[in-house]
């Protein structure tokens, strides 16, 4: 029952009988509570550890082959609390309180709870409670009005263009943008917008790139139309480069960001059938300048 049975360090922490002044748990959650008495059977200690880890009485009973009521009796008979592990809100608050000094300093710098939460990756409500407790002169640092966490269209297209320059590509993909935006912040403390922000604002990634002027090879005319021969030649070109039949993922990577190469979706529509049928159609076109075809593998 992987993930159900308590780890040895959890049991050792429960068996620590040094008294109520034990240091807090290393994961930032509240202390385990009073240590159990020394005369409690080890099996009940293990059940107690599992209960504190958040497992239900039924899960514990199934693990030991007894009923849930018997588990309740064994734990209760020893005077141990049956309280489960802290819930999500309590956990979030405990993590925030473990970084109270950092939160207070960031709030004095940014003056905005939402921006502090975004910078630290912590729950916004928990950050607000810590700020209320730790920053007694909060009104002196609050920015009025607080900055709007949303982004203007100009900001979005400027950031997309910046990623294109940094990545050295004319047309950054969602993956490339996400990799460059991760963990970065604007001068006012706001995190860089994620790809989802662009999709909500512009509906599609293609439209977002168009607004940023990042469509390679486009001169304002209609998009290029590919026929079946174009698609067959594109598959055959990659096949020759690899020396073997390409996978769908390899072709998708090959066509990404290249306006002169049809996408996988277009290839499927123009040629029809599954990927094996597409490869069978492209095989006769593998002969290069030398007249030789790549040797079939596997």
Image (cartoon, grey):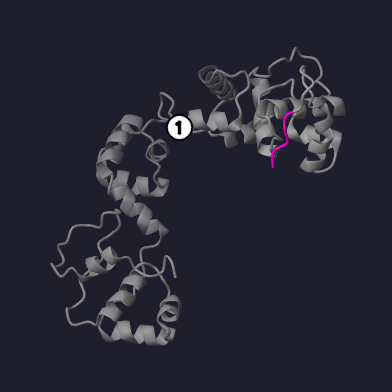
Q: Which residue is mark 1?
A: 191
Residue 151, placed above or below residue 26: above
From the image, give the main secondary structure of the stretch colored magenta.
loop
User: Is residue 37 left or right of 153 when viewed as pictured?
Assistant: left
Residue 148, placed above or below residue 171: below
Which secondary structure, mark 1? loop
Q: Position of residue 28 (x, y in %)?
A: 29, 53
Whether residue 135 can be seen here: yes
Whether residue 227 can be seen here: no
Relative depth, front residue between 221 and 6: 6
Relative depth, front residue between 242 and 217: 242
Q: Residue at x 45, y 32 (%)?
A: 191
User: Is residue 291 left or right of 159 when viewed as pictured?
Assistant: right
Q: Position of residue 8 (x, y in %)?
A: 28, 66
Q: Residue at x 40, y 57 (%)?
A: 89
Residue 221 picture quarter: top right
Q: Which residues are magenta?
A: 294-298
User: Is residue 166 left or right of 266 when viewed as pictured?
Assistant: left
């Amino acid at each position: 029952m992987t993930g159900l049975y308590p780890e040895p360090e959890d049991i050792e922490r429960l068996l620590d009988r040094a008294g109520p002044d034990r240091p807090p748990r290393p994961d930032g959650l509240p202390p385990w509570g009073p240590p159990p008495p020394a005369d409690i059977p080890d099996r009940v200690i293990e059940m107690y550890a599992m209960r504190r880890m958040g497992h239900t009485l039924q899960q514990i009973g199934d693990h030991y082959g007894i009923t849930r009521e018997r588990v309740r009796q064994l734990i209760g008979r020893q005077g141990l609390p049956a309280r489960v592990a802290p819930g999500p809100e309590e956990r979030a608050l405990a993590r925030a309180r473990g970084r109270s000094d950092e939160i207070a300093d960031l709030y004095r710098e940014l003056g905005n709870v939402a921006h502090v939460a975004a910078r630290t990756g912590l729950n916004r409500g928990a950050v607000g409670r810590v700020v209320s407790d730790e920053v007694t002169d909060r009104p002196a640092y609050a920015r009025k009005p607080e900055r709007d966490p949303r982004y203007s269209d100009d900001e979005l297209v400027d950031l997309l263009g910046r990623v294109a320059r940094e990545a050295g590509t004319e047309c950054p993909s969602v993956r490339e943008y996400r990799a460059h935006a991760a963990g970065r912040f604007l001068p006012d403390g706001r995190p860089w917008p994620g790809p989802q922000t662009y999709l909500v604002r512009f509906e599609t990634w293609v439209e977002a790139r168009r607004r940023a002027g990042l469509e390679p090879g486009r001169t304002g005319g209609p998009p290029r139309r590919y026929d079946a021969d174009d698609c067959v030649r594109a598959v055959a070109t990659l096949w020759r480069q690899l020396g073997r039949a390409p996978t769908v993922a390899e072709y998708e990577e090959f066509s990404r960001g290249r306006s002169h190469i049809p996408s996988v979706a277009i290839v499927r529509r123009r040629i029809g059938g599954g990927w094996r049928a597409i490869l069978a159609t492209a095989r006769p076109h593998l002969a290069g300048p030398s007249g030789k075809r790549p040797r079939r593998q596997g």
